Image (cartoon, grey):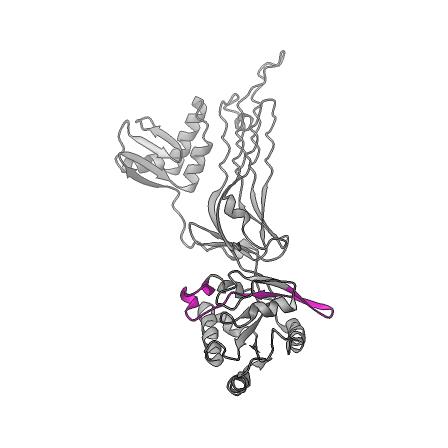
Amino acid sequence: MFYDRAKIYVKAGDGGAGAVSFRREKYVPLGGPNGGDGGRGGDIILEADEGLRTLVDFRYRRHYKADRGEHGQGKDMHGKGAENLVLRIPAGTIIKNEGTGEIMADLTRHGQRVTIAKGGRGGRGNARFMSNTNKAPTVAERGEPGEELWLLFELKLLADVGLVGFPNVGKSTLISRVSAARPKIADYHFTTLVPNLGVVQVEDESFVMADIPGIIEGAHSGAGLGHEFLRHIERTRLLLHILDISGSEGRDPLEDFKIINQELKLHNPALAERPMLVVPNKIDVNGSEENLRRLREEFGDAYEIYPISAVTGEGIDKLLHKMIQILPEVPLIGLSADPDEHRMVQVQSEDRFVITREDGMYIITGKEIERHAAMAYLDTDDGVMRFQNILKVMGVDDALKEQGIKEGNKVSIGKLELEWSEGGQ
């Protein structure tokens, strides 16, 4: 099967926790704190690989998690950072944030990389908190949680030439004749159910040709099978519009030409500007001469027309040499793997935290406050006091009082659940 869409969950590694430790060597009075920092969690990195053609690997495994950093230890020993997790995807894959629909990256060339989820930084050990007023701190930090999100992958095949046209006009026969591709060929509609790629060699030149499954009227809005593969045409630099010039199925090839061009335009207006050669196929069939004459009269001034017979090979050499001649003049489609060029611009600044009530509990949400809660070290009085001070500085205490919080009410911040008291949480 050809899989060109996938949905996966990625979770970067959490940072390691900082250590609370003190020197206790003999003859070393007042040794002081020596708790080391935690190591950084592993990133999730996506890398384009031109050797991959589908997203089938992500159909059978949908959850990916990088390792967490090692915890800090005594004697100022810092934890080791975790290895990054690299996922290889086909070149030409667009990566979207499933929750927001934001395009995060578009990897189009072999070896391009993007860090899609960053690992959490390691927590600081108690050696970092020593000061003139606190010579023996018993506070440290938990590791910062790694980023996590659901991703949507959407593959758009990369090809120099794309074959478009109604079903059963001879696209598969043509690509099988000029390349090593061997798509299924039969005398019925929608024989081709997946796009096929083939490398075409002409003398010392070569290019990649894509056979796109048959498009019918209404494909842009979901009719037939073409709507699933119209996006693959967006990556092709040159279009070959294949027509059944014999009208063997009772359709008018001139009307077919207008319908397909309209579908391409409705799917993406930029396709209307893409260079196109018109290729009337089946000129070996009786009745093709009259339709070919009509086609030349109707569109001969607007398009270059190259009649062929994909079965006998007539006219194919002339068509191939024309493609080799004009492909160097066709500009590459400008695409970028830089995620910063795709990210949505946030005009308004986000609140530092938001308080809601649910079943009598005060729920505090916000990226910054949830990060502080996840890294809070609550095993010692010093750690609890430090976290309380953070909440006061951020204005959480005042905001809760304004909303009428009472003694004993529950407060939830991320995975942390606290009980409110008049002296603080």
The picture quadrant where one finds residue 369 is top left
Q: Left or right of 1: which side holds 356?
A: left
Q: Residue 266 in the image: x percent, y percent?
A: 44, 70
369 and 280: which one is in front? 280
Locate residue 403 relative to residue 173 in the image: left or right: left
Q: Residue furthest top?
A: 26
Give the total of numbered labels: 0
The residue most toward the right is 204
Q: In the rendered view, does 30 fall on the left or right side of 414?
A: right
Q: Which quadrant, please, contains the C terminus? A: top left
Above-or-below relation of 44 to 81: below
The segment highlighted magenta reads 199-227
**Residue toward you, 346 or 183:** 183
Where's residue 265, x and y in %?
46, 72
Residue 201 within the magenta-colored segment of the rendering: yes
Q: Is residue 296 above or below residue 165?
A: below
Residue at x 57% of width, y 39% of height:
42
**Residue 349, x across and y down, in percent:** 41, 50
Q: Is residue 336 magenta?
A: no
Q: Is residue 404 visible?
A: yes
In the image: residue 204, left or right of residue 120? right
Visible residue check, residue 153: no
